[in-house]
Image (cartoon, grey):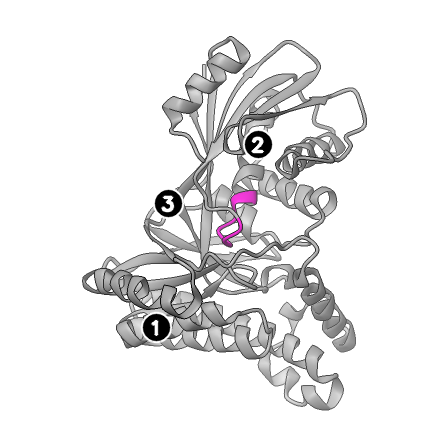
Amino acid sequence: MSLTVAELHQLFSSHFSATTDFHFRAPGRVNLIGEHTDYNDGFVLPCAINFDTHVLARKNGLNLIRVVAADYANQVDEIPLDQVIAHHLDYQWANYVRGVVQSLQRQGISLVGCDLAISGNVPQGAGLSSSAALEVALGLTFTTLAEQAMSLSQIALTGQQAENHFVGCNSGIMDQLISAQGQAGNAVLIDCRSLECHAVAMPQELSVVIINSNVKRGLVGSEYNTRRAQCEAGAAHYGVKALRDLDTAAIGNIFDELDDVTARRVRHVVTENARTLAAAKALANDDIRTLSQLMAQSHASMRDDFEITVAPIDYLVSLVDSIIGNRGGVRMTGGGFGGCVVALVPHDLVADVKAQIAANYPEHFGLMADVFVCQPSAGAEIVTQP
């Protein structure tokens, strides 16, 4: 259970018998369109949301990082800075902390001993990047305390390295980069090869609604890594660095050249890249009808070609679509196999969407869905410092 910032300050004081000097924040994210394109060097269109991970910190004068995790029953971890960083065998959350420490050390950053208290309200296991919010907040924390200048893009890359090489999930750069570079009131079109970010204003008449199906999914050790390997096999077949380098014309005879499964994986990524660029243009032009069509096509591609949706997710998308039509858009968001649906909903239909989900979803699947009405928010920041 997450704490308020005031409660986190109280925990820090009671646990470490000291007051905190620094407060860092990094947000979760929702991806409007562009799924499984990021690790293919492609394009994504996420926005940071007003759900955050908070880290309170102070230097402790020791060669040791001490951490208390408020959201895990105040579990603690200690990380000596003069020893090889090993995996924590019992606490998965601790491996994200250790992974960021290791990644920074391997970049030659000389870290300083510190005490940390961590809490956040980004729903976990829902596809809203609670792990990336933690990694980015920690990267900003450790580099600031060590007085080592590092850009937000570098901090995002550090978080990705921690997740890929220490935690063991081959995620792309999108989650960490939007947590670092989010802009209030905007989605951000990200080129995952160059890391260029372009703000795209969100239409004022639409709410960002996130529906957590409460079908839990874990990406580590799941089908996620399989999908990535299939995409790499497709790129190797075409002799390109990544699927980003193909367009729809290049894959015209794809089913003659690849096995059925790999062909469908490749087709999803190539067409999803095209949809993402078109969606950014539609969003900038306030062309909601086109955006609606692109989000629907994206969901169908994830369902049929990439095969990462599940029945409860497909049902929620269909239900929301029946309410909003072409006045908004709806699709699965995140890595897949559960998690969340994102919908851009006219303000006057938000209550109806909530009511219809509450009335129908539990009856069909025996689950309660959590509905969050979010605001596109700013990225990571130092909230307070001495």
- Residue type (three-letter) at the residue carrying disc 1: Leu
Comparing labels 3 and 1, the label whose residue is closer to the camera? 1
* N-terminal-most mark, 3 or 1: 1
Residue 377: image tag: 3
- Residue type (three-letter) at the residue carrying disc 2: Leu
How far apart are labels 2 and 1 at the CA level? 38 Å
How far apart are labels 3 and 2 at the CA level? 19 Å
Query: Could you tell me which quadrant the N terminus lies in?
Result: top left
The magenta segment:
125-131
Q: Residue at x 71, y 14 (%)?
A: 63
Mark 1, residues whose alpha carbon is within 10 Å: few (<14), some, or many (≥20)? some
Instruction: Determine the residue located farthest toward the right in the rendered image.
Output: 84
Residue 232, placed above or below residue 64: below
Residue 255 spot, x, y in % from top left: 69, 88
Q: Nearer the viewer, residue 208 or 144?
A: 208
Mark 2, residues whose alpha carbon is within 10 Å: few (<14), some, or many (≥20)? many
Query: Could you tell me which quadrant the C terminus lies in?
Result: top left
Specify whether 11 is left or right of 345. right
Q: Residue at x 66, y 35 (%)?
A: 91
Task: List the residue tagged with mark 2.
Answer: 138
Residue 384 seen in the figure: no
Task: List the residue tagged with mark 1.
Answer: 319
Instruction: Determine the residue located farthest toward the left in the rendered image.
Output: 348
* N-terminal-most mark, 3 or 2: 2
Residue 251 spot, x, y in % from top left: 65, 83
